[in-house]
Structures are given as C-alpha cells and as structure tokens.
Image (tube, coloured by chain):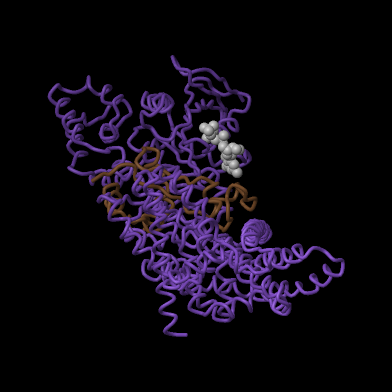
Chain colours: A brown, B purple
Amino acid sequence: MFTKFIRLMNNGKSRSLFEISELLGISPETAEAFIEYLSRKKMLSRVIYNAEELCGSNGCSHCSGCKGCDKSQSGKNVPKIWELNKKLN
Amino acid sequence: MTATLTNQPTIALLGQPNSGKSTLFNGLTGARQRVGNWPGKTVEKKEGHYDRNGLRYRVVDLPGSYSLSANSEEEIITRDYIASGQADVVCILADSSQLSRSLFMLADYAGMECPAILLLNLMDIAESQGKSVDAEKLEKKLGIPIVPFVAADRKKYDVFYAAVERALDEKKLVNADSLLENFHTIENGVFEKLLELLPNEGLESYSAHWLAIKLIEGDIAILEKIKSTLSEDNYRQIQSILSSIKNGALHTGGCKFKWVDELLSDTFVKKQERPLLSKFDRLATHRRFGKPLAILIILLGLVASFIPAAPIMFAGGLIPKLGEPIANALSAISAPQMLTDFINHVILNTLYFAVAMIGFVFGVNLVFGFLEEIGYMARVSYVFDGTMAKLGLQGKAVMPLVVSFGCTIGGAAGTRVIDSWAQRVLTIALAWVVPCAATWAIVPVLSSLFFGAWAPLIIVAIFLVAGIHMMITAKVFGSKLIRDEDRAGLIMELPPYHKPRWKALFRSIFVRTWDILSRALKVILIVSTVFWLLTYSASGSPDKTLLYRFGRAIEPATIIFGFTWQTFLAYLASMLSKEAALGVLGTLYLGAGTLFSATVGSGGEMAAGLSSVLLTSLTPPTALAFIFAVTFNAPCLMAITSTYQETRSLKWTLRILGYYFATSLILAFLAYHIASLIF
Ligand SMILES: Nc1nc2c(ncn2[C@@H]2O[C@H](COP(=O)(O)OP(=O)(O)OP(=O)(O)O)[C@@H](O)[C@H]2O)c(=O)[nH]1
C-alpha cells in the first residue's frame, strides 16, 4: 500500500483525502490514520499556514489592523494539508 | 469468600494513549492498586487486582504507547513484558470512535503469542457519532473475544469479566493470516526471505513473523535480541537483506493499515451523511466539473453582490446633492469660500465614494464569507490544483492565492510555507493578479458609475482577464524562476460542510466592511485633500496650476493608452492604494471643475454631482481603460513592501512592479481601443 501511496504522491498532484482513500482502496478513516502514521514517521508533514496570514482570506483589507478575524476560528474551514517530506521513488 | 492466592491469572492492559486504560484499571482495581517503577526504569508501573468467583486476578497497566516498536522506553517495556510470558491474557483497548487509528496497536500486536481480548472501548462515544461495529463478525475474523465496552460505566463490566475468563480458557491468539498475506506483498520478497532465516518457533512470545516485521522496520533491539539464536551465516544474510530495505516501517505500516481496513470493511458501519450533500460534494470536487462549477459559483457570487449594493449606491449618489444647501448655508453665515469649496469637493466626494462602496463590500463579504463558512472555499482551492500545476506552482501555493482575494499582503505573507525561493517569488508574482478586497470595493463603484446596469458584465470581464493574465504572467516569470523543480504531491483533507453560524458570520462581515470602509475613507480624504490643494488657485482658475499644466502636457502621450491626464494620475495613485484612485479622480474632475465653474458663476453643475461630471467628461472607452488599468496595476504600496520583505530581493520586487506597470498599461490600451470599436 505504501508503494502505491508513494506512486500517487510522486506524480505531483494534490489529492483530497477522499480521493487518496479511493485510490488506495481503503476507507477515508483508514487513509487519515495512515497519513497520521506517515507524519509520525516524518514522511509527510502538515503545512501550517499562520492564522494571521489566513485571516485575510475573507476580505480584510489589512491583516494587521483588522479586528474581523477571529483567530480561534480562522483555519477552521481551511483544508488540512500534508506534503511529502522528501522525494522517494 | 476469600479469593485463592495461588494460581492468580495476570491481565495486562494494552492500548494507545486515551484508549481508556487508566479508567478500566481504576474501575477494576479500585483501591487495590500499587504504584511503583518498572525494574531499572523511571517509567511508572501500576499493578492491582480484583477478585471474582473465588479467584484473584492481577491487573497490570502497561505504559501507554502508540505501537510496539522500539520508539520509546515505554514501548520497549511494554513489549518485553508481554514477550516474557508474565501475562496470561493481554487486554487490548481500542478507541471505538476512531477504530482505524487505534486498531494499529492490534495489528502491531498480532504475532505475539499471548492470548488476547479486544475491548472496543468508548463505545458510547462511537454510538453518539452514528458508528457501530458488528462485534460477532469481527470476532470470527480475529479469533479472539471482542467486547464492545464502556470503561467509564462500571456497572457493565460483566462482559469484560466473561471475556477474560473465556480467553483464559480458550487461550486463543490473534488470527493474523490475512495480515501475513499483506506482508508477503512487501517489495523484493524480503518478508519470506527473513522468515526462512529466522527460527521457526520465534523467540520468547514473539512469533517468527513478528520478528521478521520488526527487522524490516529497522528495529535494532530485536536484531540484538535474536543475534544469539542465529548461526553466523544466517545473521550475515539477514544483515545483507536488511541493508537493502528502504522505508521498511512505512511498508509494514501500510500492510497493517490495509489489514485494519479489511477488518473494518464489513464490520464497521458509519451513518451516512446527508446524501444530497455528498452528491453535491462529488460534483464540487470532481476533476472535470468541479472547476467550472467553482467559477460559476464565484461569478454568480460577485454578480449577486450587486443586489444589496444597488440601493446603497443610489443613496450614496444623493450625497453630492447636499453641496448646494451646504454652500448656501455657509454663505449665509459668510464662511470663507475656501471652506465651502473644501466641504463640497473633498468631504462630500469622499463620503459619496465611501457610501457607494458599502453595499458592494458588504455583498462580496457576505457571499464569500458564506461560501467559506459552509466549507465550500476549501473545495475551490482543491479543484484548482491542476491549474496551479499548469502555472508551475506548488499545490500549497493555493492558499496564498485564495488569501489574495482578501488582501495581497496576506497572500505574500502566506507564501512563507513554500520552501523554494523561486516558487515563492512566482507565487507572489501571480498573487498580484488576484483582485483584492479593495479592488472589489472600487471597481464596482466605477463600473456602476459608467456602465450602470452593465456593471456586472465588467466584473465578469475582469475575472476572465485575470485568468488569462495569470497564464501569461506564469509563463513570463516561470521561465526565469523555475528550474524543472519536481512538484511534490499534497494531500488535502477538506473540512466537512456545515451550517453557517450566522451570528458570527455577520459579526465578522460587519467588522470587515467597516475595516475596508474606514481605510477607504482615510485614504480618499487624504489624497483628495492633497490633490485639491495642488489644484487650488486663489485666482479661481485651476487651469493655471502647475498640476494642470503638467497634466495637459502629458495628455497627448497618455491618450494613446486611453487615459485622460486626470485618469492617468488617478491610475498612478492607485499604485499607492486602490482607493486613492477614487480620491484623485473625484478631485481632479469635480473638485477643480466646479471650483472653476463656481467662480465663474454656474453653481448648478456643483449640485449635479460627480457622477454626471464624470459621465460627461469620460467616454466609455476611457472609463473602461481606466477600470482595467487600476484593477491590474500594482496592488498597493504595502503589497510592494511586503513583496520585498518576502522575496528579500529588490531586483525581483522591481521586476514584478515594472511588469505590472507595463501590463496594466497594455491592458488599458487594449480595453480602450477595443471598446472604441464597440461604443
Ligand atoms: N465516554 C467515555 N469516556 C471514556 C471511556 N473510557 C475512558 N473514557 C475517558 O477517556 C479519557 C481517557 O481515558 P484514560 O483512561 O485516561 O485513557 P488512557 O488510555 O489511560 O490514557 P493515558 O493515560 O494517556 O495512557 C478520560 O477522560 C476518560 O474519562 C468510555 O468508555 N466512555
């Protein structure tokens, strides 16, 4: 499964968790657990966008002075993104 | 009845953190527990007992660990204890609300030759999430007692006691046949090769296959352990096999998760989400249809934003009409003429623009806030991945681009997650194309002013041009910046759809609208004042001012690109901030114009307001050229500065700036000449 996973990741496409799970023939829950495992093994890492950076996503003209951004909420509707840490074949 | 102290069965509790081990341990042993350390270790050891049917059961709480690898002291203690044979039955706890994850422990345990039971703990939580497990079926597959369980509820421990007794009686091991089949798929047949070299009977309670898997995972402790049981030749062969393995733990992990998935595939049921929504999601994330759908929804959103905007824009249009009564009132109290002029030409204009913007800013924020709140915007970023790849961008550049819809500065800062400098610069260069919130505030005002009901069409045109612009820009910058870098794949977990929390949504929309508005008010006021002063002449004729003379001098050149000298200066000002363009335009046309006419005596024009002055002074082609030029000009001074900060390259910042200056002029030129053919 890992070999197939790496093949899917190495062609440079972004895939949703759902798509990955379908391609690997497992449930989205298992796919998520597997991804978490691979992150634990430092093969994948989460891409974390700073809350302040994302805060502009809804149209504050200016992040520094903007009070419209609820930091606790920002990022809630942003996809969780993982990327491959190193190139594998 | 006192329990017999001889023949005390020992139960070891095994589970990942938070699987409920401590809860069960406390529930079983109550006050009958002892806390010490594992021999020679600093790790806490908890032991206790419970009595049942005349028998005393010892309970050992094994240290919480994710798996049985050699990643931590806890994991080594745990597996050594099990292998030593001191436990009569191992009770594996799994969190039923996340079985895929927590059954990994079971997969890692399979191959240990000690009878086990599986407690599907936290069943109450799982049920509340609409999840259920067919324990009987699972038991058939695994061969060991399976117990749906709630450790927090001590009244229902009977099922546990019964399962322990059964396990002690039947002494069944986890059936790992299908797991072994998975292990056989590991590349180059390393699993079989190792099995051939390892002692058939394994070592202690470790079966041969368990040992082989640990070796593939690069487990040094296990290699050391088995060394003494192997002939020198076998040991050397094993070492040579191991040296050929890359990412062993990832391969075995894949097999284990696959096995877990097979176990759950027909035993685990999760209540289906709303079917209509999942149908929509299939479409929204479809490789082919997702993108046109997203474009359609965004365009409809932008156009729909005109609905709340139109009446407010109309109301804003009445503000300049206040000029005449104010002028009359001021002259009645014989206020200085300059004050009257200032109020009429700077204050009222500023207010007019600000009010005209409110509706649209509110509308855009409402529509996009709503789309984001329900979780749709995340899908948009996902479906545009293919486009991003074509532009030469990494997948994770999508968020900075989406953020740029709000603010280019945020977009530039968002590129920090991109490791490659060249990719970062390219992403920023492209983020400049994305019209920011300020653009979405002023462009509709200008389009409505000049094109009335056709304004939404201008918005659509801008959107399309932005798309083409991005393609060209990516080519221009990409050829210099990207050196055949491989694009790493990404995985995106899209947030679930949910109902909007209207209160929070509206609160943030109001704050954001106010944020944009107050900034616009400030910028327009300052810029208007400066330009008003520059064109103010005591003689009453702005024609004589330096700015006018300069303007007239450059006009023959600017008109080639479709600019009057006034719109050209406004275009230049938009590089500082988009709103500034409105300030300049207002002052140069209405301010100076009416100052001129007011002093020569035709006060009527003043009341007519800016819109009619602009409409009579600018032809549709010049207006269109201006709109395009401002939209695709450099976003603002702050964005230029943050581009410099993020790229740390003056050369590239200036290149990007120069490129946008040139392309916005070209776009103005094209818009002007094409529109001239039509209008
Ligand atoms: N609702 C519910 N909660 C439970 C159940 N079992 C345990 N919990 C709760 O889950 C949390 C974690 O349980 P613990 O017993 O501390 O888990 P643990 O496996 O010992 O975790 P570590 O101490 O980290 O190893 C606690 O808040 C418990 O109260 C259960 O069956 N149902």
| Horizontal arrangement in the rendering, residue B194 relative to residue B395 (left or right) | left
Residue B473, placed above or below residue B322: above
Q: Position of residue B104 (x, y in %)?
A: 40, 41
Q: Is residue B501 visible?
A: no
| Horizontal arrangement in the rendering, residue A52 relative to residue B211 (left or right) | right
Residue B639, placed above or below residue B167: below
| Total numbered labels placed on residues in the image | 0
Question: Which residue: 32% across, 45% down?
Answer: B254
Residue B20, placed above or below residue A56: above
Q: Looking at the image, which residue sits at the far top?
A: B40
Q: Position of residue B74 (x, y in %)?
A: 44, 26
Q: Nearer the viewer, residue A22 or B543?
A: B543
Q: Position of residue B363 (x, y in %)?
A: 61, 68
Q: Nearer the viewer, residue B396 or B570?
A: B570
Question: Which residue: 72% across, 75% down?
Answer: B318
* Quarter of the figure with the N terminus of chain B: top right
Q: Nearer the viewer, residue B452 or A83?
A: B452
Quadrant of picture, ligand 1: top right
| Horizontal arrangement in the rendering, residue A14 relative to residue B581 (left or right) | left
Question: Which residue: 64% across, 53% down?
Answer: A68
